[in-house]
Image (cartoon, rainbow, N blue to C red):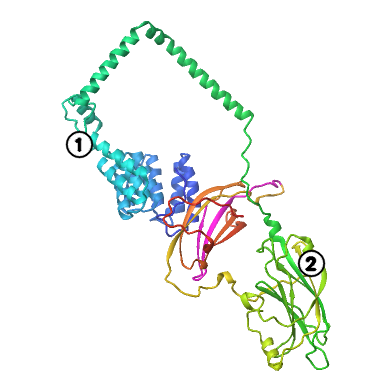
Amino acid sequence: MGKSKPSGGAKEMDPVALHRKLEPIYEMIDGGNNKAALKSIDRELLSKFPAMQIGRVLKGIVLQRMGKDDEGLDLCESVRLEGPRDDTVLHTLSLFYKNTGRTEQTTAMFEAAAEAQPRNPEYLRSLFQSYARDRAFVKQQTCAMKLYRLTNDPKHIMWAVCGALLQTRDGGESVDDDDDANARSSGSGSFSATNPLCQDPLDPSSKIGREALEARERLRAKLLARRNSLRGRAASFAYPYVREGVRFCRAASRTYLATRRFLFPPPPPPPPALPTHDVQTRTARKLFVRVEKAESLLAMDSGGVSDPFATARWGSVECTTEIVYSTVDPVWDETFVFDLGGVGDVVEEDLTLCLYDYDLALNDFLGFVRVDLKGKKVANAKDWSEEGKWYNVEALPEDYGKDGEGGGGFDWGRVKDQLMFWEGKRTYTGRVKIAVWVGTRDDSTMRVASHPTPWRKTEPSRTDAVFYVEPLTAALHVFVRQGRDILPMDGSKDDPGGLSDPYCEVILEHEKTQKMETEQTHYIDDVDAPEWDRKFSFVVSQPYTQNTLWFKVYDYDGGFDQLIGMVKLKCEDLEIHQGLVKPPAAKWYT
């Protein structure tokens, strides 16, 4: 019994749950434990879903193996008359009919499936094989031509030619073996080709048949004379000994090679030269920002003082300090932490700091500070320092808020500042001491640092399309081949090196409709380099910027699966192929 992930005939059950229930049933059937398999089918499948096609077919196979042919045939015939369209159900039914010698039902089943889905090449190939078993050569040729028109594969032309030659040999009809032998032995020419230009070399009444017969007679006489000669007799005497010697030498050679491979196995091939990343180190990196203090800020309240606080923005998140009342030289000494997991080796955005004077109605704007981080390497320790550095307070740049930098939102503090100083620009004073450095989540500073909050809901790469067009659908094919260096998640005190039971979950996220399509592979026990070889297909529509593909690898634990890692791909970054014949080369993703 082949083990695959079934889906047809069980629309009420989740495909993943169905796969897990069928896995032990397949093992029972393969091991010959028919009674246990029958109980498991009734308890796990048919008790909850009596109309499940795959469950009824498997029950029919088990009954047939237990000697209850009539009951098994009734179950399988009821499924066949329903017109199944799932590959697993069709091939399991064909296995039952093959074991019971009912090939005509197999042919009728695949004819109905091919008629319902005429553009499915798998159904047509199975139908071609059924015609070949039934010796229906005319239908075999027609089916091969349909396959060629559908796939443009040259081998299907050869299939059609073979069908035509078999028709020529058998007179255009399928014949039995006894009729074939009688037609050939009669010698009367009744076994003739439909094509008048084609002559049978085994028909002695034709010219080519007479020439072939004379050639065989001459060859037979020549072989008989050679066998009766002295050399022929010597060869006949020595041939058995030579044959046994050659056989013994070949067996000894195979034994020697097998022993050498066992004692001195060849070294394993080197792994492909692909860039590797330490996922744990990369996800543990953090950017720490300490806003220590400020001096000589503008006095916006009576008495020559202010109530200053600062707001720091980096990327799409921001953090705010506490308010220090009645001073122009505030001391905050607050530390904030930003995540560097999604940042590459080089920082691509500066840190901006806006200073405000707290008021009950509208906050007064006290100035702007830019900390130059763009272009600095995350791993270069010389670019970072925990010692604070003084930055002068400046006016807000004219281009601030454009292209998604820093602001971009509506700020009442800046509106109030413009209304109060409409006669001219304000002159800002003071300076701020800020320290910026790169650390990890294991640092002691992580315990006291505050985490930022998002100030904008969407990133630039996820904005909606400006112009709406009629959506064009496309097929998204995903082939999950294998994994490598999977983290061990099943370790314990007794077995610290326990490997994982990994499986991969493929999720297509439609951001506009908030719809998630999920598929997943089977899990493999105790491996760090699993080979799944599973193919999934989805349907996406333009604009492709609203579709995201996620690959999540889990360690199977029977309900409490642990996430090992994930990969995110934007559909707009994938290559588009039209009329694809050969799939593109596989790629590794970390």
Residue at the image position 54 percent from the left and 57 percent from the top: 505
Name the secondary structure under disc 2.
helix
| x, y percent for residue 217 | 25, 16
Determine which of the numbered discs, if any, sits on residue 195 in the image.
1
On the question of residue 71 being in view, the answer is no
Q: Nearer the viewer, residue 130 or 579?
A: 579
Q: Is residue 273 above or below residue 235?
A: below
On the question of residue 369 being in view, the answer is yes
**What residue does disc 2 label?**
445
- The picture quadrant where one finds residue 568 is bottom right
- The picture quadrant where one finds residue 160 is top left
501 is within the stretch colored magenta: yes
Q: CA distance from mark 2 to mark 1?
A: 92 Å
| x, y percent for residue 77 | 32, 48
Residue at the image position 67 percent from the left and 76 percent from the top: 406
Residue range in magenta is: 494-521
Left or right of 333: which side holds 102?
Answer: left
- The picture quadrant where one finds residue 166 is top left
Q: Nearer the viewer, residue 572 or 446?
A: 572
